Image (spheres, helix red, strand yellow):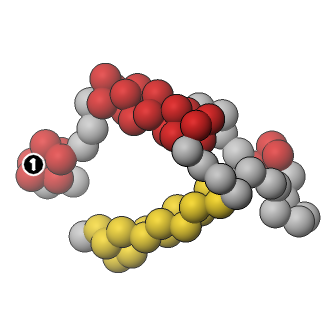
Amino acid sequence: MTDGQDRDRLSDEEVAQMMDLWRRYCAHDLDQWEALQTETPYGPVYVFMTRSLPQEWDPSMFREF
């Protein structure tokens, strides 16, 4: 990782804040699902949040936050 990329990393405090905001979003704003996409230096990233577990997915696949 280059110095510039290292400076772009989130601090532990920023990660904690992001997780808190995601919890609030999921509790108060997420209806049935949300599908997001963003570009990164390494290509696109896709984020899918849903209130139901996709078929044939095991809950142990997920990391709790």
How many numbered dots are placed on residues in this image? 1
Q: Residue furthest right?
A: 56
**Image-quadrant location for residue 12:** top left
Name the residue that disc number 1 marks: 3
Q: Residues within 10 Å of mark 1 (few under 14, many from 20)?
A: few
In the rendered image, the quadrant that contains the C terminus is top right
Question: Residue 57's spot in the image, x, y percent?
Answer: 84, 59
Depth check, front residue: 56 or 29? 29
| Residue 49 left/right relative to 2 | right
Depth check, front residue: 41 or 51? 51
Q: Secondary structure at mark 1?
A: helix
In the rendered image, the quadrant that contains the N terminus is bottom left
Residue at figure coordinates x 27%, y 38% from the top left: 10
Depth check, front residue: 7 or 53? 53
| Residue 36 left/right relative to 57 | left
Q: Is residue 41 above or below residue 19?
A: below
| Residue 14 left/right relative to 28 | left
